Structure formats: C-alpha cells, structure tokens
Amino acid sequence: MKRFLTLLAAGLFLLVACEPDPVLSLDKTKLDFSEAGGTQTIAVSANNTWHILMEDSDTFYTVSPMDGKGDGMITVTVKPNTTSANRSETVGVICESHDRTMTQTFTVSQTCPVGKVQIESLEFNPPRVNNVFDAEGGLITVEFTTNAAWTLTCNQSDVTLDLTSGSEGNYTATAIVPVCPDFEGRTIKLTLTCRTSAGGVSEEFGTAQAGGLVVYGDVVYHAVQMQDGRWWMQENLRYIPSGLTPSDDATNVNAGIWYPLVIDELTADKATVKFSKYEEDIIANGYLYSSEVALGLKPGDITVDNAATFEGAQGICPKGWHIPTKAEIIALVGKTADKTDTNPNAPYFDAELNGGNGSAALLNADFFNAGAWGAVSIANTAATKGTTMGAIKAYQGGMNTGYIAGSTVHQVTTNDDGSLKNVQFVALMPNMNNGTYNGAWNNYRNGVSVRCVKNQ
C-alpha cells in the first residue's frame, strides 16, 4: 500500500510538472474608434483558460466574452462619445496554467466629437440701420447651441457679456454695448469658440457701431457729417463754464449765459417767449451764450484790439472742435446777409428758395436738426437791459428765429472816445417762417445758441 501511494504521488508530480507554460497572443493591441463608436474584434490564441481584466465595469465600452479557453474571439463594443474629451482605457487578457499566468493587453481609444456651434438667432436692440448699430449703444442678443464646452469673447473691452463660457447645450447670451467711444465709429466683433481635443470651430459675428458722438462735460452730443465734408453738432451746447451761472433775466446784460427760451403757451398769440429751467427744455434747446462766453472768455474780455483774433477758436467747445467760421457757414448754406458772400454751389443752398437762400429743409434732410431757439438781444455796450426774441405771430409752428454763434468778426464799432461799442460776428440765423438758414450779423453781447464744428 505504501508503495502504491508513493507511485501515485510521483505520477501526479510528473503530470503537473509536464503541464506547459501558458501561451497567449492577441492579433491586435490597439482598437481605435471614432466619436460614433461601433464594434471591433480581436483574435485570441491561447493554450489554456483566459479571462478579461477591466479597469472599471462601468465604462464607455463592453467586452464579450469575459472569459474563454483556447483560441477564440473577443468583441469590443464602444458607445457614442458625447463628451468633449477623447477617452482611452487598457484592457488585460490573462491566461492561466497551473500556478503560472501570462498577460497581454490591448487599448480601447475613442476620439471625442469636434466642437460645433449653431447660431439660432441674432438680435440688435435697438435695430440696426443700414447694418450699423446705434452709436448710443444697446443690446446684442445671440441664441446658440453647442455640442461641447464653449467660450464667448468680444474685441471691445467696454462691451459687457452676461455669459462668457458654458458646457454643451442651448444658451442665450447678451452683450451690453455702451456709447461708442470712437468718434469715427468702430467694429464690435463677438467670437464664439467651441473646441474639443479633436478640434472645433470659432464663429465670429457682430456689427459696425456708428460714431458721431461727443462726450463732453458728462453729456453725450450727436454730430453728423454734412455734405460740406465737415462734422457739425446736431444739438446745441448745454455746457456751463466754470464760474458762471445761467440767468433767467433778460435785463442781466452781463450774465454771459442764459436759460433756454420756449414759447409761452399761455399767451393767446403764441408769439411770446419765456425762459425755461426745465431739464427737458435745456436738453432740447441748450443754453444761450454771449459771444465772449462762447469763445471761452468772460464778459468784458473782448476789446477793440482783440475782437478779430478769435476766428476758429475752440471756445467752450470740446477739444478738437471750434466755433464756426464765416467760411464754414458759407460753405454749408451758401449765403450771408452780404449778397457778395453767396455761394450757389454750397450743398444746402436752394436757388429757388425766396430768390436763393440756405435751406432749413435741405439741412434737415441730412439730419442737421435745423431749427430756431430764440435769443437774448442786447444792442451794444451802452445797453443796460436786453429783450427776448424768437417768436412771431405769423409763425405758429414754434420758435421762428435766433442765432448759432460764429467766430468771424463782421464789424467792430467804437464810441466817440474810441472804446468798444459793439462787435458783430457772422452767425447762422434761421427764419423758420420761410425756411431759410443763412449767415447773419450777431451782436457780441446777445445770448445765442452754440454749435461746434469738428477740426479738420
């Protein structure tokens, strides 16, 4: 019996000792899948049992079968990749024989989708005119869909974006556009980028923003380039120089600045004017200035000797702008009160208007905002009080006349002792009852409207 057990043990030892080492090979060690996923196979050669070893059972692919014996096939199925990243995992195949193992690995790799953007809608508020956005700003709203992470940027640092990034999905983003800081206008470009490690796109959209705005004394003024080639303000100044206070008293001949005039609607004939301190009237009409104040001086600074030295002066205009000259008035409307100044080729001269005159209608067709705002009339240095002017009974449409200050001297008159009596500057003068807009003579102490012309 003892001999039998000894022989049996020896036989088992020889059987185990003769079992071959594990043999395992794979015909592929790397499986590459597109974002769409799919199925691929690997051929297994083995001399014993084998099984699959995965990093995580809950992953983007499945392997079947998970074990086998001898030669066989492994099927790998990959799900579509809806993430924004490429993905890859290594799978082990282990063949066992007795107490020995052999391992082979293969890699399952899948690319992510290329980033894509679909712009669903693009809106401008206020709406663009001739594909140009409003100079005063507003909102640009874009609705879009992306299939991966995205970013939104703007080339203008003063444009505020309420959303700048996000993940896959549908979004509505708003750009808050401020007043255009560039007088000549600018381009606003928004860039929506959606990229993954597999690639992506950048969609650009935006608009031109109109210029023609002047920010001065915390007030935004509009300007327009007229057919004479010059930029003119479309609004009257409402700037208060340091040390001065607007007056509502026409008898205050040394005020230098007055509140705007409006039609007194309480009068039966609507031909009487009155001063207004209401903010809406100040915004609409601007203040009234003497020529001295308009030219950047104080009341009493103009003398016989210096009266003719202020042509083209900046005065109280913003930097880069000036009080209009006689030449600029003639180039615009083609006429002054001196018939020898007539220029029939001026863009806003109408040869058929009352025998030939500058035309308010033509000016307004190009958005000059031609109108009348009245004036404080002060005859000369001897005057101790002024009077208000601007309305007539024959014109019930509003203010009829006034002046827009100019900087070129027409005439200087003196008293018998040689002291200054009066200076008349060439100014723009409307007569809205007949639609004319011509150069005329403005007494330097008058309180009149001011508009500025951009330096060329």
Image (cartoon, rainbow, N blue to C red):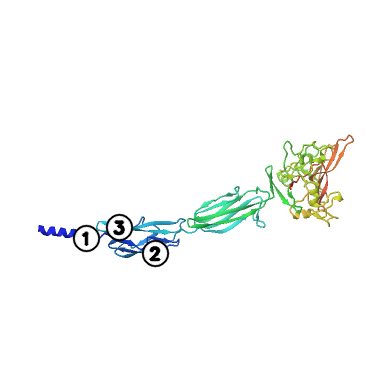
Image mark for residue 40: 2
Q: Earlier in the sequence, mark 3 or mark 1?
A: 1
Q: Is residue 248 visible?
A: no
Residue 93 is situated, as x and y percent measured from the top left of the image, at: 33, 59
Q: Earlier in the sequence, mark 2 or mark 3?
A: 2
Q: Is residue 313 visible?
A: yes
Residue 147 is situated, as x and y percent measured from the top left of the image, at: 50, 58
Q: Earlier in the sequence, mark 2 or mark 1?
A: 1
Q: Residues within 10 Å of mark 3 (few under 14, many from 20)?
A: some
Q: Residue at x 19, y 59 (%)?
A: 14
Image mark for residue 18: 1
In depth, the one of 236 and 22 nearer the eye is 22
Residue 166 is situated, as x and y percent measured from the top left of the image, at: 51, 52
Q: Quadrant of residue 411?
A: top right
Q: Quadrant of residue 79?
A: bottom left
Cα–Cα gap, marks 3 and 1 = 17 Å
**Residue 83 left/right relative to 331:** left
Q: Residue furthest top?
A: 417
Image mark for residue 102: 3
Q: What is the three-letter code of the residue carrying label 1? A: Cys
**Residue 58 left/right relative to 323:** left
Cα–Cα gap, marks 2 and 3 = 23 Å
Q: Secondary structure at mark 1?
A: helix
Q: What is the three-letter code of the residue carrying label 2? A: Gln
In depth, the one of 151 and 102 nearer the eye is 102
